[in-house]
Image: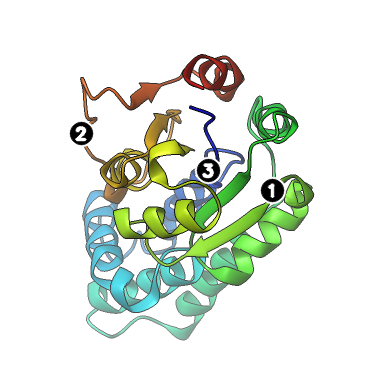
Amino acid sequence: MNLTPIGFDADDTLWHNERFFVLTQQRFTEILADYAERESLDERLLAAEARNIRHYGYGIKGFMLSMIETAIEVTESRVPAAVIGQILEIGQEMLRHPIELLPHAREAVEAMAASDRRVLLVTKGDLLDQERKLAESELFDVFDRVEIVSEKTPETYRRIFTEHGHGPERAMMVGNSMKSDVLPAIAAGAWGVHVPFDLAWALEAADPPTGHDRFVTLNNLGELDALVRRVG
């Protein structure tokens, strides 16, 4: 079948990301410990994130704004300016966190490139932050194309796989998110390869398409080359 292109997700597929959100959220609950219990804060922050995706999109800046909104809500608009300053500070620290590749990430991407298949990075999130992380990962030159999108839908994958390959039927998408990387890619007609990560954002949860003939789960990216050789 000659699979091409092969699409890779970025955050928590190629490099660490969610753990910085988890650590920052822990610090957020500590900052607001005098105003609300941790469980309540977690629930209200998640609700704010869900509401705000359509306004701010995905990424750290939207997360920062959701934290500020939650702080205003739980304090009934009495949050001190110093607390807002602390929230901005922990958010800005996230924007400076170093990039650490996940095991087998570089080898997997380079193996796909060496096989003469078009290799794509398909990620969503804040444009500037995603560009920064890609540059620091030193993987930029391996990809034939980088697509930073606002949302991953079947239509998004159809467009990308048609523009940069032979259509979704001959494409494969690899990622850690069932909701964003696997399900819409399969709906578009491509292979959806799930590489689970230990941490997962609640808003990315979805049931796997068990039994679908184009759905595969790998233990890690080190297994990808053998899968692609077997599939085509």
Nearest to the observer: residue 139 or residue 199? 139
Give neighbour class at mark 1: few <14, some 14-19, many 20+ (Cα, 10 Å): some
Q: Residue at x 66, y 63 (%)?
A: 131
Q: Residue at x 45, y 19 (%)?
A: 218
Describe residue 208's horizontal placement relative to residue 65 as left or right.
left
**Disc number lying in front (2 or 1):** 1
Nearest to the observer: residue 11 or residue 120? 120
Describe residue 193's horizontal placement relative to residue 208 as left or right.
right
Q: Earlier in the sequence, mark 2 or mark 1?
A: 1
Report x, y in % for residue 179: 30, 44
Q: Which mark is residue 7?
A: 3
Residue type pointed to by label 1: Phe
Q: Read off the residue under disc 1.
A: 143
Nearest to the observer: residue 229 or residue 200? 229
Find the distance from the CA under tag 2 to the CA under tag 3: 21 Å
Residue type pointed to by label 3: Gly
Image quadrant of residue 28? bottom left
Secondary structure under tag 3 reads strand
Q: Earlier in the sequence, mark 2 or mark 3?
A: 3
Can residue 112 be seen in this snapshot? Answer: yes
Position of residue 4 relative to residue 144, above or below, is above
